[in-house]
Image (cartoon, rainbow, N blue to C red):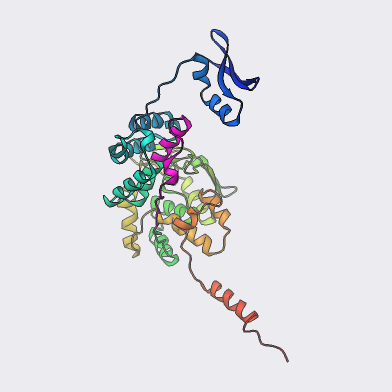
Amino acid sequence: MKISGKVYTRGSKLWVSAYTDEGRVRKPTGKDDTPANRKWAERNFHDLITGQKKEIPKTFTQFAHICLESTNHKRDIACQKDYLAKLRLHIAPVFSKYELRDIKALDIEKWQNMLLNKGLSQQTVKRCRSILSMVLKKAVGNDLIAKNPCDYAEPISVFHKKKPPYKIDEVRSIFKAAEGKGFIEIYLKIAFGTGMRVGEILALKWEDIDFSNNVIYLCRSISKGKIKGDTHQKNHKRLVVMPQFVSDVLRKASLLQSCEWVFPSPRTQEPYAESKTLVKYHFKPLLEEAGVSYKTLMATRHTYISTMRNQGLDKSLVQEIVGHAEGSGVTDKHYFLPEINALKVQSVNNIFEQTLLKKTQN
């Protein structure tokens, strides 16, 4: 039944009024007109008009499944499967015996410690906790519980070990070894020269590249064979500055293009579904030839960010180029490895020479 209407005051009491398929309906709530009661009436508007209480499961597992299904439009298919798997494997086995109102902060803390003692990573436990918190927050919004016990449970602290970037002399050796090798040379110059994610590079089309302005209009990414655009977690739609050496190698390759994709699979003429083939058959053999140890393919992104930041490029500009939210701590926490170079040492020395060590003139 389609319902539209309002909450209003008659005397000192709250009433609800709505136009339904059966005509206008007006009913009293029996509650005084207070901000809290008005919010309650708005949340329960449908039930007050129809006189029918929506049955919402009070057991945790049933309600959790309803929550994940009702919010699945916010997540891609892979993320939804991950949420459901974590619910089934790590959350439901403990909380399935609980009614929602019986879950306490201490229960959550004991559960977190149990998962950590089983060997799950801090990041995985933190993700499980966020799923649990989302479900309990929905329970608060549906008047099933008064407050979210996750808000009172000790949080999980995640300590991130920064992955080391490739050093400047290593990048030079990689470029030298890749020279004239076509596919892998183009890929690595884009990766080191723009800081783009692996899936973003593999999903590039020639139409995305603007040689006149030396920019790449990033429109999509590929993950596990699925093309996707911008998400709430990662910005795959942005403008990327293209250094001249990247522009040169791409312009040369564009003259020989025979496909809309920049990096098509020779067998299918479609983008590579993932980077395993690239790493196994192209990147690792090239590193061995260059005499450089393997630090993951994603380390090209770490290298770009660290190089730009160490050379003084403004952090907000770096974040704009690589697709991090402005002001986000992710840039420095995960990707930026500071270094002490000669310029920084000289800057410190200059301060002391101009202050503490400054000679007084007679």
Q: Quadrant of the C terminus?
A: bottom right
What residue sits 30% from the left and 48% below the top? 115
Measured as percent of width and height from the top left, residue 269 is found at 38, 38
Return the residue nearer the eye: 6 or 274. Answer: 6
Return the residue nearer the eye: 272 or 15. Answer: 15
Viewer can see residue 50: yes
Q: Is residue 316 left or right of residue 47?
A: right
What residue sits 42% from the left and 41% below the top? 149
Q: Is residue 155 left or right of residue 317?
A: left
Picture layout, residue 155 above or below residue 89: below
Measured as percent of width and height from the top left, residue 218 is found at 51, 43
Quarter residue 88 falls in: top left
Measured as percent of width and height from the top left, residue 59 is found at 34, 30
The stretch drawn in magenta includes residue 150: yes
Q: Residue furthest right?
A: 362
The stretch drawn in magenta includes residue 286: no
Q: Is residue 206 left or right of residue 124?
A: right
| Number of residue marks | 0
Please give the range of residues in magenta: 132-160
Picture layout, residue 181 above or below residue 70: below
Q: Residue furthest left?
A: 118
